[in-house]
Image (cartoon, rainbow, N blue to C red):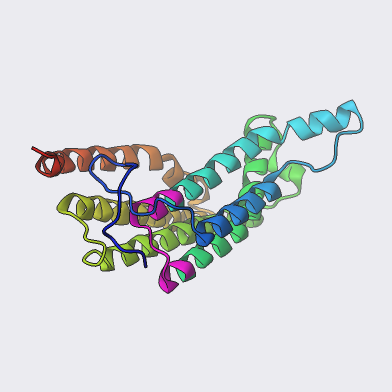
Amino acid sequence: MPSAVRPHIRRDWPGFRQRGLEVTRLEGFSDAVFGFALTLLVVALDVPKNFEDLVATMRGFPSFAVCFLLLALIWNAHYQFCRRYGLDDGMTRFLTCVLLFLVLFYVYPLKFLFNLSVNQMVFGVPADALHLKVAQISTLLVIYGFGFAAVYLALFFLYLHAWRLRDALELTALEKADTRHQLVKMLLFVALGLIAAALSSSRRTLSWGGLPYLLIFPIMRSHAFIHRRRRAPLLRDASPR
């Protein structure tokens, strides 16, 4: 684990010192895996041979854009963790590998689900035309919910590991508050994923299975607003006088 006392040049949150200023082999490996995951999301590797193939390929781009955004958010969460804490010990490597494994597992359910959603919402293709039964749609949403929860649970354990090393990292009161904020944020993502999976597991509540994902933005915005108000006095105390 790198020393906590080192030059701090870049800043993420105001007042939060950056400890991981160099790209490590762990980050390089992580970037390669995320790049491979994005490759698996590509609509088609072959160049369209005719206009019909081109139209069929273009129909996949809206779902590809959504999937790209979701993977980019996960990558950014890991990137921020690496920059804030600069950890490269055995536990960090293990938890990062778990995260990357889950991301690769997450790719195909993610791609299939959003291809299905775009075909229905944008192009008006009914689910029965795609040869999917209600039970299969339910299973797909449950798999996605558990995968979503598992990815953010891995990120939660990464931040929990940093929290346990708060004394070694010499976290200030402001940095501790920001770390706790991240822990709660990741747990909220986990809870929403599990709730979505639970709702999707029953025919009676299947139609509500997507509601927790729609609540992510207002819940996270509210959580961030509360945290900004709480960290403001800590930031003033941490600012040089």
Give whichever of 79, 110 is nearer the camera.
79
Q: Residue furthest bottom?
A: 90
Above or below, comparing residue 11 to residue 110 in the picture: above
Image mark count: 0
- Check the picture and name the quadrant holding the N terminus: bottom left
Tell me if residue 201 can be seen. Answer: no
Tell me if residue 151 can be seen. Answer: yes
Above or below, comparing residue 144 to residue 14 in the picture: below
Q: Position of residue 172 (x, y in %)?
A: 18, 54
The residue at the point 21 percent across, 55 percent down is: 176
Q: Name the side, left or right, on which 160 lies relative to 24.
A: left
Q: Position of residue 98 (x, y in %)?
A: 51, 67
Give whichever of 138, 8 is nearer the camera.
8
Q: Quadrant of residue 49?
A: top right
Main SS class of the magenta portion in the image = helix
Q: Quadrant of residue 203?
A: bottom right
The residue at the point 69 percent across, 43 percent down is: 127
Q: Position of residue 101 (x, y in %)?
A: 57, 64
The residue at the point 80 percent across, 33 percent down is: 56
Q: Name the side, left or right, on which 12 lies relative to 77.
A: left
Residue extent of the magenta highlight: 79-93
Q: Residue furthest front?
A: 7
